[in-house]
Image: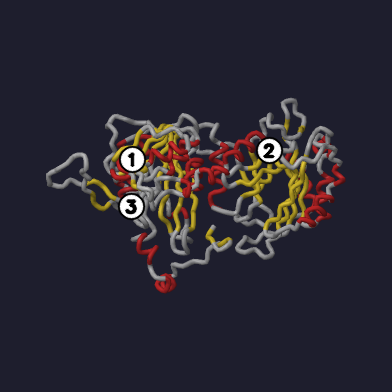
Amino acid sequence: MESNDVNERTSNSLLHTAADGRDCAPCGTCPRSVQFLCYFMHRLLDFRHAEIESIASLNGSNSSTESNGVSFDEPCGGSYLSPFWYVWLPSEDSAKTVAKRSLLVKSFLEVWGEGATWEELLASIQAYPRERIQRWCMPNISFKILVDGWGRAVKQEQQLDIINKFDFLGLQGPIKLQAPDLTLRVIIADPADNNGLPEVPYRIYFGRDVACSDRSVIHKYGLPRRKYLGPTSMDTEMAFLMCNQGQVKKGDIVYDPFVGTGSILVAASHYGAHTFGADIDIRIVRDGKVNKAGKRTDIWDNFRDYNLMSPVGLIRADAHRPPFRANLQDMFDAIICDPPYGVRAGGKKSVAKSHKITCAETHIPSTDAYTFEECLRDLLHLAAKHLKLGGRLVFFLPSVPGVDKAEQTAAHPMLAMVANCEQPLTTRYSRRLITLQKVQPYNAELEQQALLSEQSFRPPMKSIHEVVYESHSKAQESGGALHLQRYRGKLV
């Protein structure tokens, strides 16, 4: 990027127009979009844009799949995997709202300068409108300067030398390390020993922290802290990301038809939703289990321990035969779930058996295999009929890395695609978080026509279980093992 392009980005692109037509500094009150540098966490790389768009549109129209004024500019170097993206948001307040809830954003910066060298950076800052800096130079405004190395560690003595480079700004307020009025951040992108980091050009960014994320919910609701867990309990971070995709908010009604130990409902309840769950295994929703101390625990314990609103109900129900009356429609604001697709737990559906029930209290209904194709068809029907208009269906699909995402999706005439995000799990197996939004009222005739025309999901593998557990040598022969992006030994 040429120097004049840098100056234009750090100056004119941050301007927006006030009601009287004058250019003014970003204040969160004017209607035009404002540009920020979005500094991402280096994890779940395919989820980052979708999460921002979903959170930003939470207070927008619920009947549209548009990103509500959110757009991204390609990062320096052009790598999709880069953590440094320029994002356009409606206002500074919008950036604060997104950061408050996001799990994948580190911070939003109002960039005062950037460059490929220190000289270029300082020249860029000098070219930045002085009046925007001066308003932060008052004696009553406390501040601190953070030095952040991406791809490298910055030693303490180096940090002090870097901080001293910005004496020319003329900051007059007291230095305050805890909760200052102004936080300035220097980011040095230098992935020389990248340890799996993407190839990003050396670059230095400097600007004001507008908002930083708070990932404390991951620790607070971490699985090791739960009393009641199972082998398929959803990871805490992913459960909250799924709720962000589902745009869960206070007062919503959220349904999980494969509730298991309730991890997704815990995240939804944290956001103030009324939750409702079902599972085909009555032992999970009714009996719980006995822990090492000999005490019986169940799903309800997880909600009591976190002082969360308990579910409206947890029932034994079959996703193949929903428990709702035929005339019920438009009940849920979001349906969020992780359907069984035969890796750690296979799908089951109820079947009638001609044997006498000896004890109704301890009876466990008979089940049979439930293919993923059946499960998906039932799930799409459930969403089309029982979601409110504008409500979202969020669920995982099994996938194969390296296959075009357009070939690994789900379609229904009443549902529109919002996001399709891949999470690599191994070199041969991944899963995709699909987000669909209900865009028109339920129409049984139109749905039947779609089924007859085979507008449904076709898994990219015959048996997901075989793909996951096939031997390494067999995978190499079939070309199934891919070279995927790793960071500190983990797929991202």
Find out whether the residues at labels 1 and 2 contact each other: C-beta distance under 8 Å.
no
| Three-letter residue code for mark 3 | Phe
Judge by depth and name the residue closer to the eye, 166 or 399.
166
| Amino acid type assigned to the residue bearing label 2 in the image | Val
Query: Would you identify the image quadrant in which residue 210 lies?
Result: top right
Does label 1 or label 3 sit earlier along the sequence? 1
Q: Nearer the viewer, mark 1 or mark 3?
A: 1
Q: Can residue 450 be seen by looking at this rendering?
A: no
Residue annotated with mark 3: 372
Mark closer to the observer (1, 2):
1
Work out whether residue 186 can be spotted. yes
Type of residue at label 1? Ala
- Residue under pointer 1: 278
Quick one: which residue is furthest to the front in this view? 293
**Circle nearer the N terminus (1, 2):** 2
Q: Residue 47's spot in the image, x, y percent?
A: 53, 49
Q: What residue is pinned by disc 2?
A: 34
Q: Position of residue 442 (x, y in %)?
A: 35, 34
CA separation in Å, label 1 and label 2? 43 Å
Q: Name the spot of residue 449 as percent of width and height, x first.
A: 31, 42
- Disc 3: CA contacts within 10 A as few (<14), some (14-19) or many (>=20): many
Query: What residue sits 45% from the left and 45% below the top?
Result: 226
**In what element is the residue under mark 3?**
helix
